[in-house]
Amino acid sequence: MHQRLSLLRTSQGFALVELLIAVTLFGVITAFVLFSYQKVSEQLFMTTLAFETALSLRQAQSYGVSVRQFGSGADAFEAAYGVHFDRATADRFVFFADSDKNGRYTSGGDDSTGCLRGAGSECVSVYRIEKGNLIEKFCATRASGDGEECTSGTPTTITVLDVMFLRPNPDALFWTSQSQFGTTYRSATIHLISPSSLRRTVEVWNTGQISIK
């Protein structure tokens, strides 16, 4: 009888230890799965953001070349289309039509929720970046080939970047806050970053080529 009780206690003790081990292993596996899921999800969101940014640029190219109407009147089919990036709004960018033909984006009090279409606004739509992802910076390479200008980290900084397309050519046109001083560019890059510092880059050349890195 004493031997049976001893065996029972031993058996119950092993069962408790096994349960604790199983719970611990389950917790470790769950934590690993959640970490992997978050990492994969973040990578997918970053890839999606890069493709959507590139598609917005490609849409501007398509609208510009195909003579898309914006507004009304005799010159409603003559606007260049483009995408506007601003250092002050790293969580969004604007798809616009250059209706006043001044070669850059003209805001009409547009906000983060959409186009308010105030007087003179050229805003077509606003793309809001979500999930904590942001535009880390954007840069423009000078046509002279002697370097690039970015929103940070360079002697000459830029605060805005407009990438535009105007018929009949599919070539890209660039305007930055330095263009008013006569600077011209041959390419531009938009650098995207996730909350955990994953990065993707969208590059546009004056030939109209758009790529993701």
Image: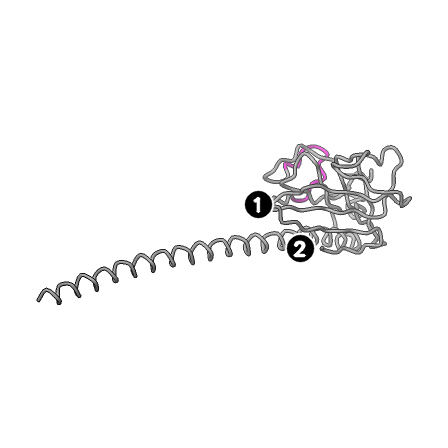
Residue found at x 78% / y 52% = 67
**Location of residue 30 (image quadrant):** bottom left
Q: Which quadrant: the N terminus?
A: bottom left
Mark sitting on residue 130 = 1
Image x and y of residue 7, in percent: 17, 66
Mark positioned earlier in the residue sequence (1 or 2): 2
Image x and y of residue 95, in percent: 70, 45
Mark sitting on residue 158 = none
**Cα distance between the residues tagged 1 and 2:** 14 Å
Instruction: Left or right? Give the position of 3 relative to 85.
Output: left
Specify the segment rendered in magenta. Answer: 116-125
Image x and y of residue 193, in percent: 64, 46
Q: Is residue 62 above or below residue 197?
A: below
Amino acid type, mark 1: Glu
Residue found at x 73% / y 54% = 58
SS for callout 1: loop
Q: Nearer the viewer, residue 51 or 146?
A: 146
Q: Nearer the viewer, residue 61 or 161?
A: 161
Residue beneath label 2, please?
51
Q: Which quadrant: the C terminus?
A: bottom right
Instruction: Left or right? Give the position of 95 relative to 14.
Output: right
The verdict on residue 85 being magenta is no
Q: Is residue 108 above or below residue 202?
A: above
SS for callout 2: helix
Image x and y of residue 79, in percent: 79, 45
